[in-house]
């Protein structure tokens, strides 16, 4: 399987679903290959694709790949997923789609952690310990969303089940 040929086929299909291709991976798995297509998009609330959107894209991609010769008729397993929260934020759209989330920015002079309150084409504003601080994208060397396990969210879910 050639990644370029697969990309040429899947990108328009994913675009018709209102999403965009984040990356494509092809991995050997015995006599088969695993074709992983990671998608992204604004989704219904502006924070990434919904499960329904990913499911629709999966059906459309499966059909397009079955009707095409880009896989060379070799056996493969198709996996379609969102880009995931562990992926570094690399474009303004990634910051915008993660508004409200806690992130750590690596800068030339250290790191800072705060919650994204706003993002535009040139930078991001974080709430850092209650103060709004702006960081231009060209000063950020790495940005990663921090996983948050909130005890109050678990307690709220338990209260609703009673």
Image (cartoon, rainbow, N blue to C red):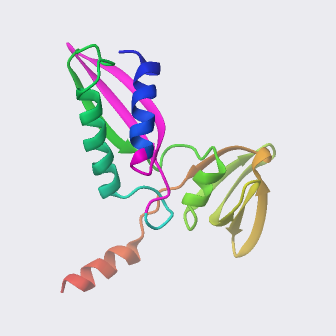
Residue at the spot 42% in from the left edge and 70% down from the top edge: 150
Q: In this view, does 52 lie above or below 60?
A: below
Q: Is residue 34 magenta?
A: yes
Residue 76, given in percent of the width and then of the height, sits at: 23, 23
Q: Is residue 83 visible?
A: no
Residue 131 location, quadrant: bottom right
Q: How many labels does the image show?
A: 0
Question: Relative to the observer, which residue lies in front, 31 or 42?
Answer: 42
Q: In this view, does 64 lie above or below 76?
A: below
Residue at the spot 24% in from the left edge and 35% down from the top edge: 63
Residue 121 location, quadrant: bottom right
Residue 29, given in percent of the width and then of the height, sits at: 25, 19
Residue 32, given in percent of the width and then of the height, sits at: 22, 17
Q: Can residue 85 be seen in this view?
A: yes
Residue 139, given in percent of the width and then of the height, sits at: 79, 46
Q: Report the magenta stretch's main SS.
A: strand
Q: In this view, does 151 lie above or below 38?
A: below
Residue at the spot 65% in from the left edge and 63% down from the top edge: 114
Q: Residues in magenta?
A: 16-43
Q: Does the magenta stretch include residue 28?
A: yes
Question: Relative to the observer, which residue lies in front, 139 or 114?
Answer: 139
């Amino acid at each position: 399987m050639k990644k370029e040929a697969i990309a040429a086929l899947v990108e328009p299909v994913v675009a018709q679903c209102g999403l965009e291709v984040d990356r494509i991976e092809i991995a050997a798995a015995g006599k088969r290959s695993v074709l992983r297509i990671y998608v992204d998009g604004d989704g219904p609330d502006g924070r990434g694709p919904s499960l329904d959107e990913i499911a629709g894209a999966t059906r459309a991609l499966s059909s397009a790949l079955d009707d095409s010769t880009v896989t060379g008729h070799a056996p493969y397993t198709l996996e379609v997923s969102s880009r995931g929260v562990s992926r570094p934020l690399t474009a303004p759209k990634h910051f915008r789609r993660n508004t409200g989330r806690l992130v750590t920015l690596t800068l030339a002079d250290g790191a800072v952690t705060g919650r994204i309150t706003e993002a535009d084409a040139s930078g991001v504003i974080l709430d850092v310990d209650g103060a709004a601080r702006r960081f231009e994208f060209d000063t950020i060397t790495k940005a990663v969303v921090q996983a948050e396990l909130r005890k109050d969210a678990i307690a709220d879910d338990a209260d609703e089940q009673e």
